[in-house]
Image: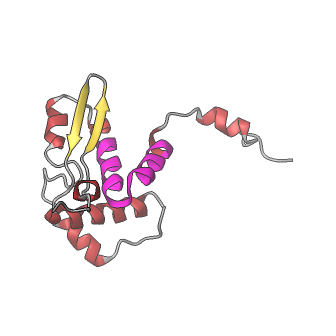
Amino acid sequence: MASAADFKAWAQQDLVIPLGDRTFTVRPPSVDDAGKLLACAVRGEVVLGIVKGPIPDEVQEVLDSIEPGEHPALGDTYQEMVDAKLSPVTIDRFAYYAIFYWARGEEYADRLARILFTPRDIAGDASAEGGGDRPKD
């Protein structure tokens, strides 16, 4: 008898990152990487001012255990991106996105990425909000 449960729908799916004519596929983090990934998310939220610091000692211990060259959010896809000659800034942005994608979900990662990485006219934003260089009268 077939199961009524759709286990495939419940499983965490790959993160697919289309970029130009390439597509990078990031597998969900392993059990070993999940704790490191969550620690990265905590650090990211503290650094960005989303939550107040400091980073708890237990979280810092997990962060300190991440070896050079280890990429819990991107996994093996990190090296694919390096081999594709993506800029370090682009790879870092994808890593930030992947951290929050895996830790908080797609919607949260999308909103944060728009805030962090969408180019904007800072001077235009300030004058549109009445925040030009002049002091208020």
Question: Please, is residue 18 above or below residue 7 in the view?
Answer: above
Name the spot of residue 123 as percent of width and height, x first. Answer: 63, 34
Q: Residue at x 23, y 59 (%)?
A: 7
Question: Please, is residue 86 above or below residue 41 in the view?
Answer: above
In the image, farthest residue toward the bottom:
57
Name the spot of residue 89 as percent of width and height, x first. Answer: 31, 38
Q: Residue at x 36, y 71 (%)?
A: 55
In the image, farthest residue toward the top:
21
Q: Is residue 77 magenta?
A: no
- Name which quarter of the figure residue 5 lies in: bottom left
- Name which quarter of the figure residue 63 lies in: bottom left
Observer-nearest residue: 103 or 7? 7
Name the spot of residue 110 as percent of width and height, x first. Answer: 44, 46
Query: What type of secondary structure mainly makes up the magenta span?
Result: helix
Observer-nearest residue: 102 or 116? 102
Q: Is residue 135 left or right of residue 34?
A: right
Q: Is residue 16 left or right of residue 106?
A: left
Q: Is residue 114 magenta?
A: yes
Question: Please, is residue 42 above or below residue 78 in the view?
Answer: below
Question: Please, is residue 35 above or below residue 133 in the view?
Answer: below
Q: Is residue 133 left or right of residue 31?
A: right
Chain part drawn in magenta: 92-115
Q: Residue at x 21, y 40 (%)?
A: 25
- Name which quarter of the figure residue 121 lies in: top right
Task: Tell me the quarter of the image containing the N terminus.
Answer: bottom left
Name the spot of residue 52 as percent of width and height, x first. Answer: 47, 70
In the image, farthest residue toward the front:
1
**How many numbered badges does the structure rendering display?**
0
Q: Is residue 97 left or right of residue 60?
A: right
Q: Residue at x 24, y 52 (%)?
A: 73
